[in-house]
Image (spheres, rainbow, N blue to C red):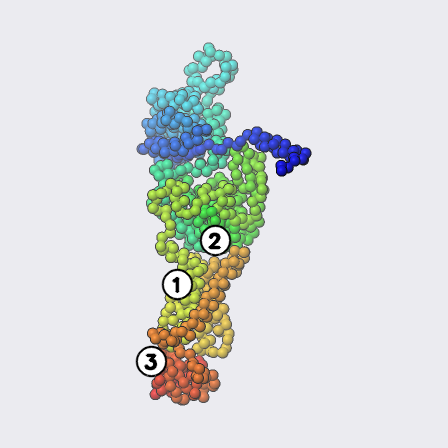
Amino acid sequence: MRPVPTRLGMRCSGLASVILLAIAALPAVAAPAAAVVVPVRLPIVGTRDTQVEAAVFKALDRLRGDAGRRGVLVLQFDAGDGEPAANSDFGRAVSLARFLSSDRLAGVKTVAWLPAGATGHAVLAALACEEIVMPPDATLGPANAAEPAVDEAMRAAYAQIAARRRAVPPAVAVALVDPAARVVRVSTDAGERFVNRAELDGVRREAAVLEVDDLQPAPLALSGRRARELGFVRLLASGPAEIARGLDIPETALAGDPSLGGGWQAAMVPLTGPITAAAAARVRTAVERAIAQGANLVCLRIDSAGGAPEQSLALAAALAALDPAAVRTVAYVPREARGDAALVAVACDELVMHPTAVLGGEGAAAISPRQGEAIAEAWRGGVARERGRPWSLPVALVVPGMAVSRAVEKGTGRIAAFTAEELARRPDRAAWEVGQPIGVGPIQLAGPAADALGLATHVVADIAGLRQAYGLVAAPALTEPGWAERLLQALASPELAWLLLLIGGAGLYIELKTPGVGLGGFVSMVAFIVYFWSQHLHGTSGWLEVMLFLAGLFCVAAEIFVLPGVGVLGLGGGLLVIAALVLASQSFVLPANDYQIRQMQWSLLGILGAAAGVAAVGFLLRRWLPATPVLRDVLLVPPGPGDQVGDDDLDGLLGAEGTTTSRLAPAGKARIGGAVRDVTSDGELIEPGVRVRVADVRGGRLHVRSI
């Protein structure tokens, strides 16, 4: 039976229809156009023009992939480290300019980005682009800065390229290279024109001249601000964020693509365990070595909970200072980049995460309010300024108490995250619409959440997904960790560390119950050496932990063999051993946040588990080992049902005689005075059943000699 529609239901249905129609009528936010940045190294000499052409051809398919919008090809003119930027070769510049203004780039918008302006014949290549973008104080021209002699071929080339693109009038283009050219801006009743002064009379015959303005100096050199006033420069911008907004392209595209110069040359650099000064220095050295060997894609594989914010900031600043047009840095987080390790991850050009990986949150270092202020200030003035990125969310991943909200840029739909402080300082704050709060620092993000907030570039399931994301199917350098690194990770893992403690404790127990120094002591020594060595390589153990452990063992041994019954040495030594083992498994002394509390709980749980395992192993060994034919002499045979264990005054047994019940090597047992007692020989090996005499009483033990 169909329900009868009520009046309220009809009203709600009608209201829903109106809302849906209103939403459908809203203008859709267009997705940013595809964009590729190709670096143009100045000066244009040698084969740099052909290198740029090859890079452009490689990017054409990507730029022409969207049939609805023209892709944007941004040519970033940057000075090299060697020859002056003004020394571009005229022939090479002409070849590049003709290519950029040819029909081969039909369907692609070309933009010349001049971060430091352009002089010399690089000006000609810039004029070959449809649009020019430069900072207000940068200078365009003069084009003959390194070539005072100007011939007719140069004038014709500049006029021809300018006529093709029409971004700059031919008369102005010639004035940029020819000191003898005098160009004027003529305002007439028919509009505005730029002509050579010699052509001014002809203009007066054609229209009524209202105003004549001479463009100076000669040869012409225009600041970005002046070129914008004259209409030659499309956009004034000082950084990637302003350019991205002005051109309506993704800001990430302005990082450049080093692979366009000849493919990716990848290298993997691991950062595992606590971040220390040594670990940060090791990573910087590895990155520098990889770049020196020709790598243009450095993948930093991070599996760390941080540990030293100042070292993480220094490493992040070093990564941010790399030229993204020459080398791309990618942080790959398969498991975690907690605490200050998140600063290293987000300082890279791109971030790739596993879906379940953790970014930020509490880590191995506790951040105080004063440290938080210092981190925020260092990040604002360092990495954020270097990369032109918002600083709020990266800092909030580490610093407690920072409230961050999601924001959407009106018109472009770009997503960012800001604190109220950062948004109030931004000159474009009116362009952002603040949405729901993200959280209060330290904020912890999984892979999909980091992707939704624009921090993560890719979310992949494994290293194969990472290689596929960057087209690195045949890149042997970008592989899973080698056997040596896997061994180190396994040794530092809690599970194997507990197993080493179990083996070491069991060996120590066997040694205490074994006549002489034998297999148990050797196994225990090796197990504890491997344990402290692995924790040292992992960055959590040093000489302090080793000395505490040795001091604890010395105190326990003194309690057993030298001063039995005192108790202070035994209790203090046991506490020292436990403290050494706990400190060796963590990077802090006392916990100061929830993460550190959990780490200490795991450390104590591991030690308790190892102790329980040692007790179980000891029980089994004492019960079953003496019954085995081969290993029956490893442990001292426990007293039988009819044996009496002596605990009376030992001094009265001096000179007494008895018979050994186990091998003395040199420790063992003998029946003396009607009871089985712990005895030691003076170093000689005495077999069971041999008659002995008590020669001395020392440290709670009888010292005997064979008769």
Q: Compared with residue 238, is residue 549 higher up or lower down, i.e. above or below?
A: below
- Quadrant where the image shows the C terminus: bottom left
Q: Where is residue 632 in the image (x, y as percent from the top left)?
A: 36, 76
Residue 104: quadrant of the picture: top left
Residue 280 in view: no
Q: What element carries label 2?
A: loop
Q: Distance between the residues labelled 1 and 2?
A: 23 Å
Q: Which residue is drawn at 34% across and 27% down?
A: 95
Residue 177 figure quarter:
top left
Q: Mark 3 points at which residue?
A: 685
Q: How many labels does the image show?
A: 3
Amino acid type at mark 3 = Leu
Q: Gap between marks 1 and 3, in whole Å?
A: 32 Å
Residue 678 visible in the picture: yes
Residue 245, x across and y down, in percent: 50, 33
**Residue type beneath disc 2:** Ala
Q: Where is residue 337 in the image (x, y as percent from the top left)?
A: 47, 50
Q: Name the residue under label 1.
A: 530
Horizontal and vertical percent for residue 397? 52, 48
Circle 2 sits on which residue?
305
Name the one closer to the observer, 573 or 514: 514
Q: Which residue is drawn at 56% across and 46% down?
A: 439
Q: Quadrant of residue 128?
A: top left
What's under tag 1, amino acid-wise?
Val
Q: Which residue is drawn at 45% across and 42% down?
A: 458
Query: Left or right of 6: which side holds 329?
Result: left
Graded by Cα atoms within 10 Å as few (under 14), some (14 to 19) or many (20 or more), the crowding at tag 1 reads some
- The reply to whether discs 1 and 2 touch (Cβ–Cβ < 8 Å) is no
